[in-house]
Image (cartoon, rainbow, N blue to C red):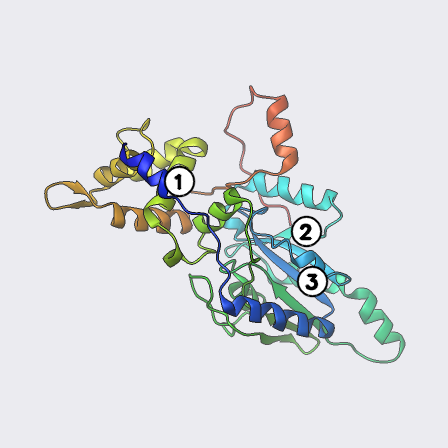
Amino acid sequence: MNDDVILRAEEKKINWYPGHMARAKRLLTDQLSRVDVVVELCDARIPRASRNPDLDALVKGKKRLLVLGKADLAEEGATRAWLAYYRSQGLDAMSFDSVRGRPKDVVARIERAASEAVARMAARGVKKTVRVMIVGVPNVGKSTFTNRINGASIAKTGDRPGVTRSNQWVRITPYLELLDTPGLLWPKIDDQQDARALAFVGTINDQIMDQQMLAIRLLELLMQIKRDAAIARFKIKEPDAAGLALLESACRGRGWLMPGGIADTDRGAAVILDEFRAGKLGRLTLQRAPETEKKAEKKPEAGPEQKSEHNEE
């Protein structure tokens, strides 16, 4: 039995629902009565996988804005397709990135969502303070997003899941407050493709997974969707390799070797994941909107290269 077969046989299902998430869910539910608008933040690279299916029931009846965050790391055309898809489903959706994102655009969308509640209070002679809850899966960038809107680093941030463990209210203006909440997954992730996508972008704690296996699966996916960039970045000399052999090829190409020229697959796996998450391979979207997939089936002759355009907000 070769090494890749052994790796596949030992691959475990990915699930991560530590105790603090159950507490976070209770905190979120307790605070809902105090908020006017819920901003759901997902990752523009994996819009489907990074939306918690439990949120629909939890925030039912609240005005809602879906924000595709980290849009600077995703392909612009793919983000536009996802926005079109979500809007066709009746959702108010926009994209936002950490480089060009304009806080005033988000504030304007929040104010529009809360306009009815503001008008009702104004009719009674009261200037309403709009309270907004920011929700999303771990490490999706809620605290960074909150700080960006605020213009100062108030909410605690980090590049790993689970940094925010409690609710944090942040006053943006005298009449606008944001509530940054802990990242929340759901108890059982049935779709393991989505689970793997969440793991690729760092939503799931790395310590609970086999990093070599995760890096192998990421490399295999990159060789399908961004082959040239993966080959160039990791100096892969055996592009048709698969499984452990592909990871070892990347290790040899980048010089991640142990004494005797043995591939240091532990180091290689860690760096591959880090470089992907940091956008070192360029803008990448791992999941396509349903309409995009249908168009691709109808027009198989279309080339992979598309003109670059700005994200639609």
Left or right: where does residue 120 sit relative to residue 208? right
The amino acid marked with disc number 1 is Arg
Left or right: where does residue 32 sit relative to residue 48? right
Distance from disc 3 to disc 2, alpha carbons, whole Å, reads 19 Å
Q: Is residue 172 above or below residue 81?
A: below
What residue is drawn where x is 42% and y is 42%?
282
Identify the element where label 2 is drawn. Answer: strand
Residue lying farthest bottom? 125
Picture coordinates of residue 301, whole percent (x, y)? 55, 19
What residue is drawn where x is 21% and y is 38%?
252
Decide: few, some or many residues near mark 3? Use Cα within 10 Å; few <14, some 14-19, many ≥20: few
Q: Which mark is residue 217?
A: 1
Decide: few, some or many residues near mark 2? Use Cα within 10 Å; few <14, some 14-19, many ≥20: many
Q: Quadrant of the N terminus?
A: top left
Displayed quadrant of residue 105: bottom right
Whichever of callouts 1 and 3 sits on the residue coming sooner in the sequence is: 3
Q: Which mark is residue 58?
A: 3
Q: Is residue 147 above or below residue 224?
A: below
Q: How many marks?
A: 3
**Cβ–Cβ under 8 Å for marks 3 and 2:** no
Residue toward you, 5 or 218: 5
Identify the element where label 1 is drawn. Answer: helix
The amino acid marked with disc number 2 is Ala
Distance from disc 2 to disc 1, alpha carbons, whole Å, reads 30 Å
- For disc 2, the marked residue is 93
What residue is drawn where x is 59% and y is 59%?
102
What residue is drawn where x is 65% and y is 68%?
133
